[in-house]
Image (cartoon, grey):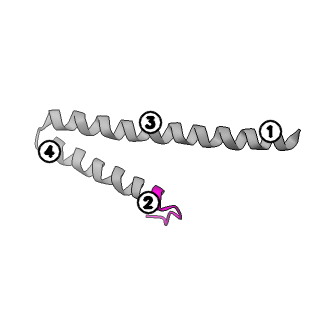
């Protein structure tokens, strides 16, 4: 695993890997209700990450735009 300088990013990666492990374990147990909850959690985390990335990039783009003017 590559070293991530940000502890928040490290925690996010560890959490997502843990959720993926639980999802794979649920598939082997035929626990489909648990699997759907795990998938929803993983998708929610990815959506939140995407929203955060878009917000961050939007802020940086506005800063660059105002610096050019």
Q: CA distance from mark 1 to mark 2?
A: 31 Å
Q: Mark 4, residues whose alpha carbon is within 10 Å: few (<14), some, or many (≥20)? A: few
Question: Where does the N terminus fall, quadrant-wise?
Answer: bottom left
**Front disc: 1 or 2:** 1
Task: Please name the residue that numbered disc 2 is placed on.
Answer: 10
Contact between marks 2 and 3 (CB within 8 A): the answer is: no
| Residue at image point 72% right, 40% down | 61
User: Quadrant of the rendered structure where residue 69 is?
Assistant: top right
Task: Please name the residue that numbered disc 4 is placed on.
Answer: 28
Q: CA distance from mark 1 to mark 4?
A: 51 Å
| Residue at image point 52% right, 36% down | 51
Task: Inspect the magenta stretch and tell me whether residue 20 lies in it.
Answer: no
Q: Secondary structure at mark 1?
A: helix
Disc on the earlier residue, 4 or 2: 2
Residue 30 in percent (x, y) is at: 11, 38
User: Quadrant of the rendered structure where residue 37 is?
Assistant: top left
* Main secondary structure of the magenta stretch: loop
Disc on the earlier residue, 1 or 2: 2
Disc on the earlier residue, 3 or 1: 3
Q: Secondary structure at mark 4?
A: helix
Residue segment shown in magenta: 1-8
Q: Is residue 65 left or right of residue 51?
A: right
| Residue at image point 78% right, 43% down | 64
Disc on the earlier residue, 4 or 3: 4
Residue 31 in percent (x, y) is at: 12, 38
Contact between marks 4 and 2 (CB within 8 A): the answer is: no
Task: Please name the residue that numbered disc 3 is placed on.
Answer: 47
Task: Please name the residue that numbered disc 1 is placed on.
Answer: 65
| Residue at image point 42% right, 40% down | 46
Q: Is residue 8 above or below residue 68?
A: below
Contact between marks 1 and 4 (CB within 8 A): the answer is: no
């Amino acid at each position: 695993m590559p070293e991530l300088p940000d502890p928040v990013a490290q925690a996010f990666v560890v959490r997502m890997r843990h959720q993926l492990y639980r999802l794979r374990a649920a598939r082997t147990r035929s626990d489909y209700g648990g699997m759907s909850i795990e998938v929803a959690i993983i998708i929610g985390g990815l959506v939140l990450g995407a929203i955060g990335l878009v917000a961050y990039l939007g802020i940086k783009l506005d800063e660059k735009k105002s610096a050019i003017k």
